[in-house]
Amino acid sequence: MYCDAHTRQRKETAPILAIFLNISGFARNTCLAAVLAAALLGIGALTDDADRGTKALLALAALAAAIGLLYRYLKFFRLYAREAFLFYAIQAPANPPED
């Protein structure tokens, strides 16, 4: 996206956009970790007879955490795109590129 590359090159806007990218990346990575934990706990609950209820409950909790973190990631990704568009609109170049 042209406006993303344009706003990331500016020294005033790059740190702000980097914060959004770091937070959304953290939420994405922890969401994936929670999905993997839910899958492993679910498999453990199905295959192991001991503590089946506890593992199933932990799998559901990890799945709920993954869903919450997915929404958090999408929220920060939306805010990142909004900020990139706003910074571009404020600092738009005089001659936009021609396609």
Image: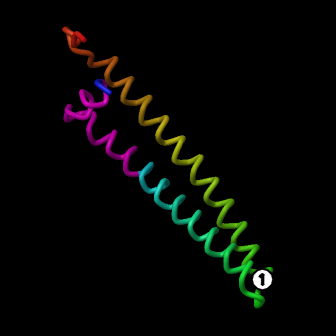
Task: Give the answer, above or below, for where 47 lies relative to 25.
Answer: below
What residue is drawn where x is 19% and y is 35%? Answer: 11
Seen in the image, is 19 located left or right of residue 65? left
Magenta region: which residues? 3-22
The one nearer the camera, 58 or 92, is 58
Seen in the image, is 83 located left or right of residue 7? right
Residue 85 point in image, percent of width and height: 38, 24
> What secondary structure do most residues of the magenta stretch adopt?
helix
What residue is drawn where x is 31% and y is 22%? Answer: 88
Q: Quadrant of the C terminus?
A: top left
Task: Give the answer, above or below, for where 6 lies relative to 58.
Answer: above
Task: Give the answer, above or below, for where 66 lies relative to 8.
Answer: below
The one nearer the camera, 11 or 94, is 94
Q: Give the labeled residue for mark 1.
A: 52
Asked if residue 14 is among those painted magenta in the image, a careful observer would answer yes
Residue 84 point in image, percent of width and height: 36, 29
Amino acid carrying mark 1 in the image = Arg
Per the image, label 1 sits on a secondary structure element best described as helix
What residue is drawn where x is 33% and y is 25%? Answer: 87
Task: Give the answer, above or below, for where 70 lies relative to 55.
Answer: above
Among all residues in the image, which is located at the extreme bottom? Answer: 50
Seen in the image, is 59 located left or right of residue 26? right
Residue 63 point in image, percent of width and height: 67, 62
